[in-house]
């Protein structure tokens, strides 16, 4: 077994160095972990050409063969779970145990889509005319591109690469500048288990704009899947329009977490903690606005305080609940949002600042009360360990407040009344609703948003459709 710490581009099964390189640092210590190769326009084009060549054979490889390779890749990730988790924790900051959880979650997409590859069935339609038959074929769309974020350095890649490969597509991945090592490590495993050269290509780059534009505008790339900010998603969508490329976008969220007066408050606290503090709040489905019915607000906050106080902040290699934020920009954003909320009347009940004994990126688990819908903290994704609580009077107002955003990714609410559960889950304008549940992600579940949170679904039986085209074949003269 070769080392999983790779630092060159991965093109056509080869490790390709570049003269220009960029540093990847550990957010807990500020130390440089590695100097990674930096793809430019020419190398990106090369990766696309290689993926195009590989497509002609991979798309014709018998399904059982592709399934076998995907299952081996899954197994290789699980066999190396600890090593992959340590690489991830070092470049991203999340605790090693949490990173190991992400490796299992990321690998589960490979396992799931290996299964889905076996179920890509077409149709023969009912006769509509004598002497004519109509078939529906499902075919791999072609060369795909994936552009991924740093908050889930493994799973955001497998969630795109696994269905692409299962469908018979090849892919070029541009991983995030902050966390390319996790991407390169799983490419090494793909190569070791025998996934053919050129099927997966990885091009880390500091020039996301150029690489992204090439991937979006190349007519050789037939599908682009992006997870990241809404602003970049809009740019990519307009670039993809130039060649009417199929696109999946998983963009920003502004998740409401509603606590109704009939909720089990202990359960609500437990689920909110799980939802909010995973990855130190740096997920697009983290509860962003905690909306509590006024009649139970004091009681809820009394229960929430000790649960937040108990959380342990520290270096990811120690036994902690949350690690540092990913970089100074992330800390600056959280500081700005908290300060602006306080300036406008919110109260800091817990935390509210960096724990400088630990280091400049360690933001304390924070509880703010007295937040209102007009504050910036209610309008922007916090992406940090801050619970911002506001109140509402009745169910209708709670729903209106929850939907009062251009985003529509995840939403959550806590209630024990069956009629309310149906009413509210139908009324929430979101792609996902967690009811008495702060964890909603699984390879079996469709993941995606409505409104400005995106287009398309990842995971689940629907996820593979994003990488397939439907062809209608009409046969006459019978
Ligand atoms: P985040 O806030 O998660 O960093 P971004 O949308 O900035 O969200 O980044 C997500 C991914 O998009 C990263 O891989 C980043 O390098 C890439 N990216 C950033 N800007 C662009 C762009 N203009 N075109 C294409 N990709 C981009």
Image (cartoon, helix red, strand yellow):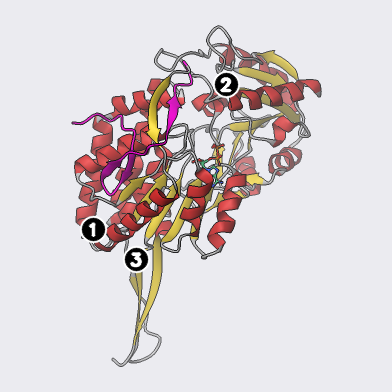
Of pointers 1 and 2, the one earlier in the residue sequence:
1
Mark 1: few, some, or many residues within 10 Å (few <14, many ≥20)?
A: some
Q: Residue 249 location in percent, x, y?
A: 53, 50
Q: Residues within 10 Å of mark 2 (few under 14, many from 20)?
A: few
Viewer-side residue, 156 vs 477: 156
At horizontal 71% and vertical 36% (from top left) the residue drawn is 379
Q: Residue at x 37, y 32 (%)?
A: 181
In screen coordinates, is 328 left or right of 336?
Answer: left
Please report contact status of discs 1 and 2: CB closer than 8 Å, yes or no. no
- Secondary structure of the residue carrying tag 2 is helix
The residue carrying mark 1 is 63
Which residue is the site of mark 2?
266
In the structure shown, which secondary structural element does the residue marked by tag 3 occupy? strand
User: In this orientation, does residue 370 appear?
Assistant: no
Q: Any magenta on residue 2? A: yes
Q: Is residue 88 above or below residue 167?
A: above
Please indicate whether residue 112 sits to the left or right of residue 398 in the image.
Answer: left
Q: Which residue is mark 3?
A: 139
In the rendered image of this protein, does residue 404 appear above or below residue 471?
above
Q: Position of residue 245 (x, y in %)?
A: 49, 62
> At x 55% / y 33%, what residue is drawn?
436
Q: Main secondary structure of the magenta part?
A: loop
Secondary-structure class at tag 1: helix
User: Which residue is outermost to the front?
Assistant: 19
Sort mark 3 into few (<14), some (14-19) or many (20+) by Cα contacts within 10 Å: some
Where is residue 161 shown, x and y percent of the image?
36, 48
Which callout, 2 or 3, points to the residue nearer the camera?
3
The magenta segment is 1-29
Q: Earlier in the sequence, mark 2 or mark 3?
A: 3
Query: Mark 1 and mark 3: span between their CA atoms?
Result: 12 Å
How far apart marks 2 and 3 lie (CA) works out to 49 Å
């Amino acid at each position: 077994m070769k080392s999983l710490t790779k630092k060159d581009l991965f093109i056509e099964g080869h490790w390709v160095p570049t003269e220009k390189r960029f540093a990847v640092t550990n957010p807990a210590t500020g130390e440089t972990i590695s100097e990674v190769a930096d793809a430019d326009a020419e190398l990106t084009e090369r990766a696309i050409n290689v993926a195009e060549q590989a497509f002609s054979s991979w798309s014709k490889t018998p399904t059982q063969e592709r399934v076998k390779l995907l299952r081996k890749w899954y197994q290789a990730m699980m066999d190396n779970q600890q090593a992959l988790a340590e690489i991830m924790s070092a470049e991203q900051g999340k605790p090693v145990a949490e990173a190991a959880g992400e490796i299992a979650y990321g690998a589960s997409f490979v396992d799931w889509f290996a299964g889905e590859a076996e179920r890509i069935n077409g149709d023969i339609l009912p006769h509509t005319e004598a002497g004519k038959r109509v078939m529906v074929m499902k075919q791999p769309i072609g060369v795909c591109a994936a552009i991924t974020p740093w908050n889930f350095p493994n799973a955001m890649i497998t969630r795109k690469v696994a269905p692409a490969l299962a469908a018979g597509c090849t892919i070029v991945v541009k991983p995030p500048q902050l966390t390319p090592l996790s991407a390169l490590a799983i490419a090494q495993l793909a190569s070791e288990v025998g996934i053919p050269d050129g099927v997966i290509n990885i091009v880390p780059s500091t020039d996301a704009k150029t690489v992204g534009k090439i991937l979006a505008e190349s007519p050789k790339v037939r599908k682009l899947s992006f997870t990241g900010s809404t602003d970049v998603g809009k740019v990519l969508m307009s670039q993809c329009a130039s060649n009417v490329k199929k696109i999946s976008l998983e963009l920003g969220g502004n998740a409401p977490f509603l606590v109704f007066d009939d909720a089990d408050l202990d359960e609500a606290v437990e689920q909110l903690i799980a939802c909010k503090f995973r990855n130190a709040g740096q997920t697009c489905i983290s509860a962003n606005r905690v909306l509590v019915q006024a009649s139970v607000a004091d009681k809820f906050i009394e229960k929430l305080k000790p649960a937040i106080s108990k959380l342990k902040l520290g270096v990811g290699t120690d036994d902690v609940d949350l690690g540092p934020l990913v970089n100074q920009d992330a800390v600056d954003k959280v500081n700005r949002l908290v300060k602006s909320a306080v300036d406008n009347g919110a109260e800091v009940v817990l935390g509210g600042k960096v724990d400088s004994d630990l280091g400049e990126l360690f933001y304390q688990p924070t509880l703010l009360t007295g937040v209102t819908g007009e504050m910036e903290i209610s309008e922007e994704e916090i992406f940090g360990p801050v619970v911002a609580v506001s109140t509402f009077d009745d169910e209708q107002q709670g729903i209106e407040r929850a939907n009062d955003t251009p985003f529509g990714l995840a939403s959550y609410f806590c209630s024990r009344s069956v009629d309310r559960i149906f009413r509210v889950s139908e009324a929430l304008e979101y792609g996902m609703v967690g009811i008495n549940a702060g964890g909603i992600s699984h390879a079996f579940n469709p993941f995606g948003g409505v409104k400005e949170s995106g287009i398309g679904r990842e995971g689940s039986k629907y996820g593979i459709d994003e990488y397939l085209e439907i062809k209608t074949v009409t046969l006459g003269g019978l």
